Image (spheres, rainbow, N blue to C red):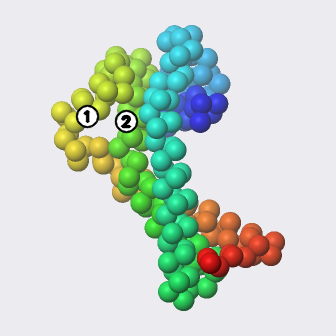
């Protein structure tokens, strides 16, 4: 996570930025250099701590629930197929995203804090969480969840479905539980 985090930070900032004075979209390398020079190299990791706390549980929930759900579906008579894995992956992706979305939202807020020359408003993760809660309550931590689900559900379904199909092509079938 930490090796590619500055790239995620730049992606978030570039997506949310307005065009530069010349009308051209800022480049990733240009933004990396600009942030490192103007705010120091540690600014490239603003929000990385919460990203680490979010990514681990998200993957654990997604992988664990996809396995549990596909096992339940097979026990109910569904074949060990790409479609079973796809359905399990869609549901697991929804559960993982819903469970970890508040941490993702805090991370994005920290990534955008101080971007494009704006004044920083958060002192860190705790301050960000407190200010978000005071501004919007619990519901504020789920603002944008529907867009996240539109991205994560098909992505997880496709990942597990393709994995299942590749496993089938390679002759690696599910070993029934004892």
Q: Residue at x 48, y 47 (%)?
A: 57
- Give the CA distance from mark 1 to mark 2: 8 Å
Q: Quadrant of the C terminus?
A: bottom right
Q: Say which residue appears at 54% left-offset and 74% top-offset.
A: 70
Q: Quadrant of the N terminus?
A: top right
Query: Contact (CB < 8 A) between labels 1 and 2?
Result: yes
Q: Position of residue 114 (x, y in %)?
A: 40, 20
Report x, y in % for residue 127.
29, 24
Residue under pointer 1: 132
Residue for badge 2: 106
Q: Residue at x 50, y 72 (%)?
A: 69
Between disc 1 and disc 2, whose residue precedes?
A: 2
Residue 7 occupies which quadrant of the picture? top right
> Circle 2 — which element?
helix
Kindly tell me whether residue 150 is visible in this rendering. Answer: no
Q: Nearer the viewer, residue 136 or 58?
A: 58
Q: Position of residue 27 (x, y in %)?
A: 62, 28
Query: Residue at the location (18% across, 33% down)?
Result: 134
For this view, does 43 lie left or right of residue 119?
right
Residue 54's x, y, as percent? 46, 42
Quadrant position of residue 156: bottom right
Furthest residue toward right? 170
| Residue 103 visible to the viewer | yes
Q: Residues within 10 Å of mark 2 (few under 14, many from 20)?
A: many
Q: Is residue 22 above or below residue 15?
A: above
Q: Residues within 10 Å of mark 1 (few under 14, many from 20)?
A: some
Does 44 sit above or below residue 165?
above
From the viewer's perspective, tell me whether residue 7 is left or right of residue 95.
right
Count numbered badges in the picture: 2
Determine the secondary structure under disc 1.
Answer: helix
């Amino acid at each position: 996570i930490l090796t590619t985090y500055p790239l995620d930070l730049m992606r978030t900032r570039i997506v949310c930025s307005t065009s530069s004075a010349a009308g051209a979209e800022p480049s990733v390398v240009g933004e990396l250099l600009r942030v490192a020079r103007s705010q120091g190299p540690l600014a490239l990791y603003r929000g990385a701590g919460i990203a680490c706390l979010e990514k681990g549980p998200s993957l654990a929930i997604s992988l664990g629930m996809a396995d549990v759900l596909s096992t339940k579906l097979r026990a109910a008579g569904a074949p060990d197929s790409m479609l079973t894995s796809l359905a399990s992956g869609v549901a697991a992706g929804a559960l993982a995203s819903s469970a970890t979305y508040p941490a993702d939202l805090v991370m994005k807020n920290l990534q955008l804090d101080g971007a494009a020359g704006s004044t920083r408003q958060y002192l860190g993760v705790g301050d960000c969480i407190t200010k978000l809660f005071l501004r919007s309550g619990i519901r504020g931590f789920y603002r944008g969840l529907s867009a996240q689900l539109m991205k994560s559900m098909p992505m997880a379904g496709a990942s597990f479905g393709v994995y299942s199909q590749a496993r089938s092509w390679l002759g690696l079938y599910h070993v029934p539980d004892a």
